Image: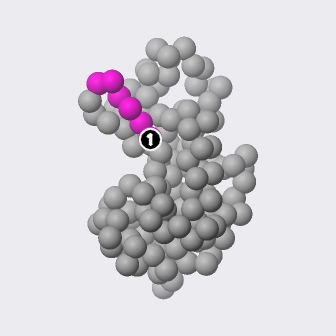
Amino acid sequence: MRCLTVLVTLIVLAGVRADAQRFFTTGVSDKGVQAYFEQLQKAVAGNQRTVVAGLVAFPLRVNHGARSHVMVANRAELLRRYDAIFTPAIRSAIVSQRYADLFANVSGVAVGKGAVWLKGICTRRRPVACHIALISVNLPPGG
């Protein structure tokens, strides 16, 4: 809750109306979210695995249904397990998602009806700086 309060305060201090920004809860401007999202789509479509890994916040949570998940600790582990995590269905969900149709709430930004979630990651030092990153992948149970 404190992080959300800080983000809202930063937006007010910056003179940006919260309702003018779709993704204000991420701490990143809409243009920043769009640039990140387009970079993610391009990297996934081009099978640029190292670029995709650079767009992830670790540990990455990989859910297999509602009751089972694993945490991918770092970039090297993600690259070893890339095909099992970024399945054809997950890659398709990312590549086919339209920016205009992204859904956001306090949990983050849903891509592909929640197949993948993005979230604003903010520093704790002053001045606060935020960037968007991929934080979770939702595979079907047993997938």
Residue 28 x, y percent position in the rendering: 51, 35
Residue 38 magenta-drawn?
Answer: no
Q: Which residues are magenta?
A: 126-131
Magenta segment main secondary structure:
loop
Q: Which residue is mark 1?
A: 131
Q: Nearer the viewer, residue 122 or 66?
A: 122
Q: Is residue 131 left or right of residue 71?
A: right
Residue 87 x, y percent position in the rendering: 55, 78
Q: Nearer the viewer, residue 32 or 12?
A: 32
Mark 1: which amino acid? His
Pointer 1 local density, CA inside 10 Å: few below 14, some 14–19, many at least 20:
some
Determine the image quadrant of residue 95.
bottom right
Residue 43 x, y percent position in the rendering: 57, 62
Secondary structure type for disc 1: strand
> Which of the image's four quarters has the N terminus?
top left
Q: Is residue 48 above or below residue 126?
A: below
Determine the image quadrant of residue 53.
bottom left
Q: How many marks?
A: 1
Residue 130 magenta-drawn?
Answer: yes
Task: Identify the residue at image location x=46%, y=14%.
Answer: 13
